[in-house]
Image: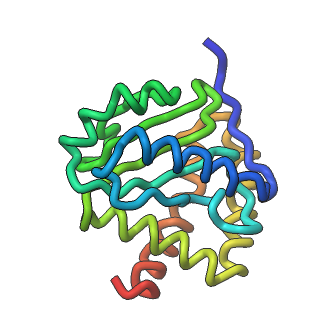
Amino acid sequence: MSTRVIEVVDYDPNWKNAFETERVMLSKAIGNNAVKVEHIGSTSVKGLAAKPVIDILIEVISLDELDTSNRNIEALGYLVKGENGIEGRRYFQKGGNQRSHHVHAFQTNDSHLHRHRAFKEYLIAHSAIALEYGSIKKEAVSKSENDINVYMALKNSFIQKHEKLALEWFGI
């Protein structure tokens, strides 16, 4: 088994197109149960350095109905991961060990939908904070030795602080 290489790269304008391609395919795979399919995470914030992994947020009417779409989603190359540590989520990965896409699906009105949306919009609206976040990620990846848990831990205090501020700023 190969070791996952964690990298943070400068913003790539092609990430928007990569998301759009997936949005269309996922919308077809899920059907009318999908209320909204959104580009989230660092690759959705223009100018922000990021791991080159497209994060996608899907709001659905029913998680049970989404579960019946698993074969359609697998046919797009995704690995179905279930809740994967977050209650009320359905999580999918694409790209094998070197992930290319992450999909996070939640039912309408789940607080995680609001959290993801608020953090994205907050970073877009506060470019200096987004640049600081990019620097923190670059430093974290240089210290993590390809250990995703170390990488995440090194970013955690920034995320906790600014996610709370984002929710307040977003009015939640």
* 63 shown above or below 110: above
Q: Nearer the viewer, residue 17 or 45?
A: 17
* 156 shown above or below 72: below
Q: Nearer the viewer, residue 84 or 77?
A: 77
At x 50% / y 30%, what residue is drawn? 76
- Horizontal and vertical percent position of residue 128: 72, 80
Instruction: Give the left or right position of residue 75, taking residue 11 as reference.
Output: left
Instruction: Give the left or right position of residue 156, taking residue 45 as reference.
Output: left
Q: Nearer the viewer, residue 76 or 145?
A: 76
At x 68% / y 57%, what residue is drawn? 16
Instruction: Give the left or right position of residue 12, taking residue 127 as reference.
Output: right
At x 59% / y 54%, what residue is drawn? 154
Q: Quadrant of the C terminus?
A: bottom left
* 58 shown above or below 169: above
- Horizontal and vertical percent position of residue 52: 70, 46
- Horizontal and vertical percent position of residue 30: 36, 42
Q: Quadrant of the N terminus?
A: top right
At x 34% / y 53%, what residue is drawn? 34
